[in-house]
Image (spheres, rainbow, N blue to C red):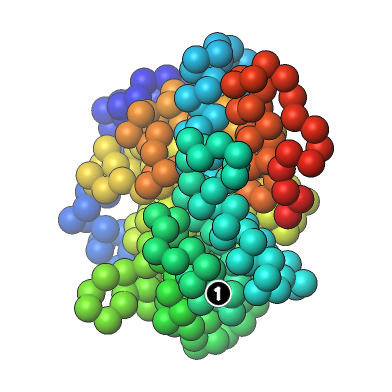
Amino acid sequence: MPTTAPSPGAPSEGSASRPGDAPSAGGLADVTASDSALRRFLHGLPGVDAVGLEARAAALGTRSIKTTAKAYAIDLAISMIDLTTLEGADTPGKVRALAAKAVHPDPTDRTAPMTAAVCVYPDMAATAKAALNGADVKVASVATAFPAGRAALPVKLADVRDAVAAGADEIDMVIDRGAFLSGRYLSVFEEIQAVKAECVRPGGTAARLKVIFETGELSTYDNIRRASWIGMMAGADFIKTSTGKVAVNATPANTLLMLEAVRDFRAQTGVQVGVKPAGGIRSTKDAIKFLVLVNETAGADWLDSHWFRFGASSLLNDLLMQRQKLSTGRYSGPDYVTVD
């Protein structure tokens, strides 16, 4: 697949033709002026060829990565991880330990890169920020009544304000899937915009916004494509597959579809948006498959932690063990990595 988007109307390999009527940056206001206008645009997007999409994702997953490239890919994947703990039993001690691991993933090898971020609940954002102590690791906080998103808008916005005030550098919000699935697309769009506005800090800097679709609940690839365009048009800095709290989370196919969407969106508007698959990515082999998807679909511009992330907890341990295997020629014992 080419790394640059085809001209409007040309087919996008493996899924469906790109939207010929996709708006330019200056034309978004017309598309989102009313619920009916937004619905016409979204339902005018070409349907996704599910068989072609899944076949393309499967084919890219068979690419062979040799030793030197594998070592580079492992370090790149480590640098893209949002090291995550989102459990009811989270404690300040666990968050501080996670922050320490994010800064020094392998205490025996200080050449290992830091992770991109530590992802926690809003009430743990200040603890994570203090524990990182100025290290070049972001604090990401879930918000908007994560993971279900079942709360009134003022409650969701207060959740975001609390996280930003506590020092969160990034906000991971969940969309209202009930509104989306009932066709109230403008409501979803406006809620994302409202959350985006709350990400702005005093002084004008802003936390980056990741918009979670919960793809496992959207039922169809067409819905994932529509949600991707809603998120991007509403100002998402990242579009994210999942919360990690449902049965079906990130898959190569739904991530490929979202990578095609961000590629096409930049071609049409000049605005680059990141992608974050989350949930179920546990092995080095899986992570490398996703990096191949990025390179072959969106292109090298997205092969950076500013534009691509993994939402994961256990993935880091496997990457570290594979990293040591490449370095020493042998696998470590079970006590080589911490159990999070």
**Which residue is drawn at the image coordinates 59% and 21% (left, top)?**
327
Residue 190 seen: no
Q: Nearer the viewer, residue 105 or 307?
A: 105
Q: Where on the picture, by quarter, is residue 164?
A: bottom left
**98 to 226, vertically: above or below:** below
Decide if residue 9 is on the left or right side of residue 82: left
Percent of width and height locating residue 297 = 43, 28
Decide if residue 34 is on the left or right side of residue 327: left
**Which residue is drawn at the image coordinates 62% and 15% (left, top)?**
62
Q: Where on the picture, by quarter, is residue 10?
A: top left
Residue at numbered disc 1: 127
Q: Nearer the viewer, residue 7 or 5?
A: 5
**Which residue is drawn at the image coordinates 44% and 23% (left, top)?**
296
Decide if residue 63 is on the left or right side of residue 1: right
- Provide the secondary structure element on which disc 1 rests: helix
Neighbour class for label 1 at 10 Å: few (<14), some, many (≥20)? many
Percent of width and height locating residue 330 = 72, 19
Q: Residue furthest left?
A: 26
Percent of width and height locating residue 209 = 42, 63
Tag 1: residue type? Thr
Residue 199 seen: yes
**53 to 108, vertically: above or below:** above
**4 to 43, vertically: above or below:** above
